[in-house]
Amino acid sequence: MAPSSDILFLLLLPVAAALTTPGSCSGCGPPSLPMLVGLMAADLVVSLLIVAVVFVCACPRRRPTQEDDKIYMNMPGRG
């Protein structure tokens, strides 16, 4: 469960956003198209990297079992 300070922050965030005046910082405004394309490409690369890491970690590794070479004398059906 989230601490009460985090919940308070989330509740006050829209209030703080409403109180800021538009244009109070230099360079603020709608993002340009090349910047949006760059952000989308970066998001795609990071998402594919995460999927690849999860896939590599989740795939079972095929290691030859060494039990096939052993002779079990007290186990029927194993040699």
Image (spheres, grey):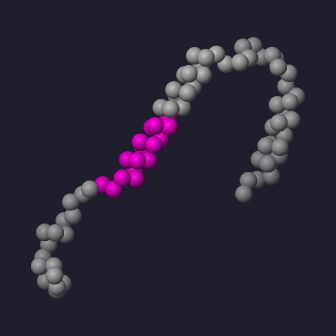
> Could you tell me how many numbered marks the image carries?
0
The secondary structure that dominates the magenta segment is: helix
Could you say where residue 34 lies in the image, as x and y percent from the top left? Answer: 57, 16
Residue at horizontal 71 percent and vertical 18 percent from the top: 30
Quadrant for residue 53, please give it.
top left
Residue 41 lies in the magenta-colored region? no
Residue at the extreme top of the image, as rendered: 26
| In the image, residue 7 above or below residue 25 | below
Residue 48 lies in the magenta-colored region? yes
Could you say which is closer to the camera, residue 42 or residue 26?
Answer: 42
Which image quarter holds the N terminus? bottom right
Could you say where residue 32 lies in the image, as x and y percent from the top left? Answer: 64, 16
Quadrant for residue 75, please give it.
bottom left
Residue at horizontal 81 percent and vertical 37 percent from the top: 13
Could you say where residue 62 lies in the image, as x and y percent from the top left? Answer: 26, 56
Q: Which residues are magenta?
A: 46-61
Could you say where residue 43 lies in the image, as x and y percent from the top left? Answer: 54, 31
Residue at horizontal 47 percent and vertical 41 percent from the top: 50
Residue at horizontal 85 percent and vertical 25 percent from the top: 20
In the image: residue 33, left or right of residue 14? left
In the image: residue 5, left or right of residue 50? right
Could you say which is closer to the camera, residue 39 or residue 69?
Answer: 39
Quadrant for residue 79, please give it.
bottom left
